[in-house]
Image (tube, grey):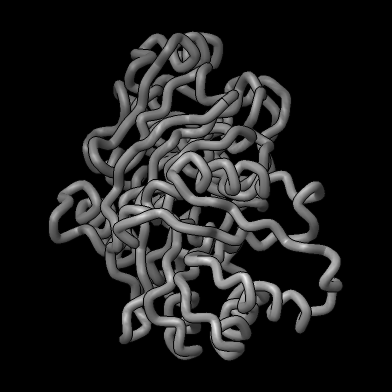
């Protein structure tokens, strides 16, 4: 950090798409004159030096104790929870909220029965209880797996088909869960299916190719498909495309990781501006930790620190796989409430 620049490091654990989103946001900030007279120097894929005058941006990475402020948007880990220098724009994921269940009930027009597919076992997955609580709070009755039927894949399929819940809920949008969803469909299950992650063009294309049009995916931020009605999302897209053109890069498929990087960078910039021109890491932390609120209206947040080191930001949107292998908005971005 100097009188005319601030260096932000994206360590090697940051995802390539997240780095592009963050770089695009920093590029626009610099084009607008920087922040309080300082340009943002974004060092991509570098290791954090640990110096107290450093900042780090991990769009989907790992926070840790130390003196370096870290911004990110972790979706599948708890590394930002309780860490004094960590600022997760989607909050700490250790506690449940009702948002996913609420969005799915809005998409369906009602709440019925739901089966949450455990990644391993309900007791062994840190997100199982939170997800089950989200759907119960939205009015769903959560069906639990009867272990007496056996632990084979065919036994599990038969159990779900026989139980015939209105909804099957997957804790991730991996290749394995997509195969499971296809297997259920092929076994005769006709209910709805929803995924906690998977907001990528590749997932939409694979799901559509597998005949799973209509399955839904949770997003932490307003989806790119809402750009026609949401000028903030359109600005994000424009910033990314302008950055790629400037750098001579091919167009990056727009994904949740791109959005995570962009909004992590945006939150950092807003906190940096609020700190003022007399900038030190200590003053930055004092500002960002004093009930500082960040939001992009109707698009991302609101996040407030230190509160959101303990609880999630209970907001999101729901997208649906369309027949042409793309996503469309099922339920627009909105906020719910955190649960005990």
**Toward the viewer: 7 or 312?**
312
Q: How many marks?
A: 0
**Toward the viewer: 314 or 45?**
314
Q: Is residue 282 above or below residue 218?
A: above
Could you tell me if residue 15 is visible in this image? Answer: yes
Please give the name of the residue rendered at 66% of the width and 24% of the height, measured from the top-left corner.
Answer: 83
Please give the name of the residue rendered at 56% of the width and 72% of the height, measured from the top-left corner.
Answer: 164
**Residue 231 position within the rendered picture, expressed as x and y whole percent measured from the top left:** 15, 50
Q: Is residue 36 above or below residue 163?
A: above
**Toward the viewer: 155 or 207?**
155
**Residue 154 position within the rendered picture, expressed as x and y whole percent measured from the top left:** 76, 83
Going by the image, does 211 lie left or right of 84?
A: left
Going by the image, does 230 lie left or right of 56?
A: left
Going by the image, does 245 lie left or right of 113?
A: left
Please give the name of the residue rendered at 57% of the width and 25% of the height, measured from the top-left corner.
Answer: 340
Please give the name of the residue rendered at 86% of the width and 73% of the height, measured from the top-left corner.
Answer: 150
**Residue 235 position within the rendered picture, expressed as x and y whole percent measured from the top left:** 21, 51
Quarter of the figure with residue 162: bottom right
Could you tell me if residue 54 is visible in this image? Answer: no
Q: Is residue 197 above or below residue 268?
A: below
Going by the image, does 259 lie left or right of 198?
A: left
**Residue 17 position within the rendered picture, expressed as x and y whole percent measured from the top left:** 49, 61
């Amino acid at each position: 950090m100097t009188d005319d620049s601030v260096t932000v490091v994206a360590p090697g654990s940051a995802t390539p798409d997240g780095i592009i989103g963050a770089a695009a946001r920093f590029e626009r900030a610099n084009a607008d004159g920087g922040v309080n007279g300082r340009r943002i120097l974004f060092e991509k894929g570098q290791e954090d030096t640990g110096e107290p005058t450093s900042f780090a941006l991990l769009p989907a990475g790992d926070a840790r104790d130390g003196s370096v402020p870290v911004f990110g948007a972790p979706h599948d880990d708890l590394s930002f929870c309780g860490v004094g220098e960590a600022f997760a724009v989607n909050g700490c994921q250790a506690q449940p909220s009702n948002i996913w269940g609420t969005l799915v009930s809005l998409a369906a027009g009602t709440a019925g029965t739901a089966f949450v597919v455990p990644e391993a076992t309900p007791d062994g997955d840190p997100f199982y209880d939170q997800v089950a609580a989200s759907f119960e709070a939205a009015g769903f009755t959560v069906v639990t797996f009867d272990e007496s039927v056996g632990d084979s894949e065919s036994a599990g399929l038969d159990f779900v088909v026989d139980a015939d819940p209105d909804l099957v809920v997957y804790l991730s949008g991996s290749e394995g869960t997509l195969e499971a969803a296809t297997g259920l469909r092929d076994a005769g299950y006709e209910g709805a299916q929803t995924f906690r992650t998977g907001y990528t063009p590749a997932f939409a294309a694979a799901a559509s190719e597998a005949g799973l049009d209509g399955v839904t995916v949770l997003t932490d931020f307003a989806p790119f498909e809402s750009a026609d009605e949401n000028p903030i999302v359109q600005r994000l897209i424009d910033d990314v495309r302008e950055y790629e053109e400037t750098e001579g890069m091919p167009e990056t498929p727009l994904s949740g990781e791109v959005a995570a990087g962009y909004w992590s960078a945006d939150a950092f910039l807003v906190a940096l501006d609020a700190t003022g021109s007399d900038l030190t890491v200590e003053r930055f932390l004092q500002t960002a930790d004093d009930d500082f609120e960040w939001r992009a209206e109707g698009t991302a947040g609101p996040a407030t620190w230190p509160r959101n080191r303990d609880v999630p930001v209970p907001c999101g949107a729901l997208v649906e796989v369309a027949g042409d292998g793309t996503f469309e908005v099922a339920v627009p971005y909105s906020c719910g409430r955190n649960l005990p």
